[in-house]
Image: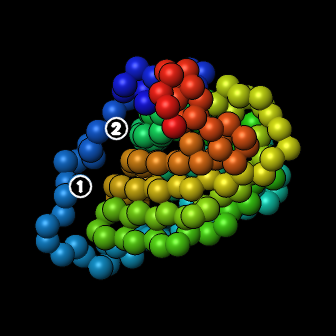
């Protein structure tokens, strides 16, 4: 919708870009990858998930940078969906995504993943729904409500050495907003005079 000039949300907190491939230009793997490297990637992502889950359970809304520094490179890149945007470095990631996400959504429950697949330095996971939360106001520039809504998420990670370097994140924001009574596609049809 954004690319077609029909942007349906308030401005993103980070840069809205078309997400590029990996900085290392090795995202298309046509040959078998090392299972040892795959295990390293899986272990690292599992550690990161455990750290963030512990933070969710604690109810702490701000994540100290030291928590992320355990598993992320300082110059990491996080490629978020339109509505959130892409951000570079741990401090910018925290300012432009993590803090708004943590402070404007409450009662976060990690529902688990349908699959986690690691291959070499890459790992992908998804959950339907991955995360359930309640907006308190401010996330995506929208008002809060009391509706618990599901985020269906696909994440792809690239590990560089012993830390994560890049993360491509796809969140079905249309579904999450629809669960709260905002049908973005229907609103667009109405605004543009497009019949159902």
Measure the C-alpha gap from mark 2 to mark 1.
Answer: 13 Å
- Mark 1 surroundings: few (<14), some (14-19) or many (≥20) residues within 10 A: few
The correct choice, above or below, for 131 with respect to 192 in the image is below
Q: Residue furthest bottom?
A: 35
Q: Which mark is residue 27?
A: 1
What number of labels is visible?
2
Q: Say whether residue 117 is left or right of residue 95.
A: left
Q: Say whether residue 191 is left or right of residue 24.
A: right
Quadrant occupied by the N terminus? top left
| Circle 1 SS class | loop
Q: Residue furthest front?
A: 195
Query: Foreground: 77 or 133?
Result: 133
Quarter of the view holding residue 100: top right
Residue 119 seen in the current view: yes
- Residue 98: image location, x then y, percent: 62, 39
Residue 92 seen in the current view: no
Q: Residue furthest left?
A: 30
Which residue in the protein does label 2 denote? 19
Q: Identify the residue at horizontal 42%, vertical 49% (top origin).
A: 167
Q: Identify the residue at horizontal 46%, vertical 22% (top origin).
A: 6
- Residue 47: image location, x then y, percent: 56, 66
Q: Say whether residue 80 is left or right of residue 122.
A: right
């Amino acid at each position: 919708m954004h690319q077609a000039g029909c942007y349906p949300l308030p401005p993103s907190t980070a840069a809205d870009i078309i997400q590029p491939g990996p900085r290392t230009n090795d995202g298309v793997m046509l040959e078998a990858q090392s299972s040892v490297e795959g295990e390293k990637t899986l272990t690292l992502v599992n550690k990161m998930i455990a750290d963030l889950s512990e933070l969710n359970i604690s109810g702490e809304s701000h994540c100290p940078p030291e928590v992320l520094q355990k598993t992320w490179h300082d110059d990491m890149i996080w490629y978020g969906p339109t509505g959130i945007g892409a951000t570079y470095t741990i401090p910018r990631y925290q300012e432009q995504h993590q803090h708004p996400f943590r402070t404007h959504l409450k009662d976060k429950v990690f529902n688990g993943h349908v699959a986690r697949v690691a291959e070499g330095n890459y790992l992908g996971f998804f959950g339907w729904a991955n995360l359930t939360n309640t907006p308190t106001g401010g996330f995506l520039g929208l008002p809060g409500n009391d509706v618990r809504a599901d985020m269906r998420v696909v994440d792809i990670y690239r590990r560089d050495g012993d830390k994560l370097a890049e993360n491509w994140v796809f969140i079905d924001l249309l579904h999450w907003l629809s669960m709260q009574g905002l049908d973005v596609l229907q609103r667009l049809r109405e605004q543009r005079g497009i019949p159902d």
